[in-house]
Image (tube, grey):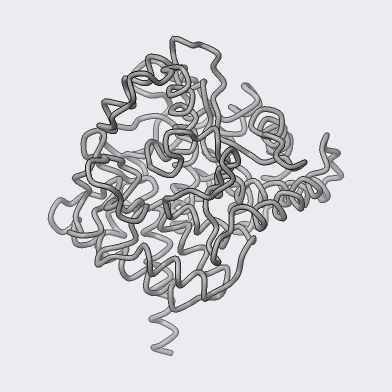
Amino acid sequence: MEVRNYIRNNWKKSIRTHNKLGNSIDVPYPYNSPCSEGLFDELYYWDTYFLNRGLLQDNLLEQAKNNILDISYLISKFGFMPNAARLDMLTRSQPPYFVSMVNDYYVKTNDKNIIELTIDSMNKEMEFWINNRTKEVENTLVFQYKSNSDDKDLYINFVNEYKARCKKLINEFEDKEIIGRNALAECESGWDFSSRFNQRELNYVPIDLNSLMYFNLLKVDEFNALFNYKSKYNYKKIARKLASFLKNHNKVDGIYYDYDFVNNKVSSTLSMASFYPFKFNLFNCRRNYNKLFKRLVHEYGLASTEKEEEGCNYQWGYPNMWPSLILIAFDGAININNEKKATELALIYTKTVEKEFAKTNKLWEKYDVNIGSRSILNEYSETEMLGWTAGCYNVLYDYLKEKNNEKDN
């Protein structure tokens, strides 16, 4: 209960009206940054989805709504939600969780007004991803992470950041613009950086993004029907063709991977992105869920990827456990009625967070699955967190509490 109380007492400390760096994009409502104190001060995109899950668990409905309306405002203003509400983050978005945020709030409150307030923005976001983040492969629109920038110098300069953060050797004869384009596209995935795409994200059909967009298309179509809203695209048709493509190309031996359409093969990296099809209704096989779980689980949690070659310093890889991905895996287990794995995952995550909290009195951005402490494999300094660490903890802690109450009764 100590961590749960810490979270309740710190939500207010994470509320901002603008970031302290002075390059913020103003939003109309107070927002939650990922930190009560620490490195991150802005309104971030996908962080806010997981953060909002924690707010909803604590019945902080007004603030959860504020975050949704701020993102809706930014989508209306720019045609998409930037990586964060900062001027230098307009080159890219992040995984498009806005529809899920609206849906979570609606499910919690049964308030259709939130749909009416945001339906224009939800459709505008769908149009952005269809118009700007798709590629036609075998007569199917598949979604990719990319960048909005055409600045060659930005891409070339970004190579240096990639090298500095990843300690990854880059062939000196490779085209630096191509490397930079792929690296910046990978940043839009939120996984900056990992071995999933072998430095060539633009060759891939990412399983996380495409599972999420499959859900988004069908859910916005459902919301449109509630208000007789006419969209520019046939979302159902796009979603159905996409699902068929993913099942035929991304799935190998019962597990969905990222698919390299240039070389016609799946990624050599098994990652927690493979849990996305379970969460977003593409897959419901418990046996294959358990197989995936077994390959990624360690003493103190699930690693972002399987163990990789020595010398790679990817923060979105082994041995790091990211709370956002834990919540995806947990939701996937719940979605397919895999109660045993949901409970196992909830126990291992809450115990790891509590173990480190007992030493530091803080929550952290990510954890090490081997030692059960805050991660020491970083591309930047260890980061105090509230955000998705708190959101995931609230959901999993409350799930375990409910299960214990059921036993007592």
Residue at the left extreme, as displayed: 359
Q: Toward the viewer: 162 or 369? A: 162
- Give the image location of residue 143, x and y in percent: 63, 39
Q: Position of residue 273 (x, y in %)?
A: 48, 52
- Quadrant assignment, res 147: top right
State the quadrant of the N terminus. Answer: bottom left
At x 26%, y 50%, the residue is: 363
Query: Nearest the camera: 294 or 53?
Result: 294
Q: Quadrant of the C terminus?
A: bottom left
Image height check: is 254 above or below 132? Answer: below
**Percent x, y for residue 24?**
43, 20
- Quadrant assignment, res 96: top right
Q: Residue at x 69, y 38 (%)?
A: 122
Please state the total of marks drawn on the protein image. Answer: 0
For the residue pair 204 and 84, the one nearer the viewer reads as 204
Percent x, y for residue 235? 78, 45
Residue drawn 15% across the image and 51% down it: 360
Residue at 51% x, 21% y is 91
- The answer to whether residue 233 is left or right of residue 367 is right
Q: Is residue 218 above or below residue 234?
A: below
In the picture, measured across the screen, residue 224 lies left or right of residue 187, that is: right
Q: Is residue 199 found left or right of 358 in the rendered image?
A: right
Q: Is residue 357 visible in this depiction of the protein?
A: yes
- Kindly tell me whether residue 30 is visible in this rendering: no
Q: Is residue 2 left or right of residue 273?
A: left
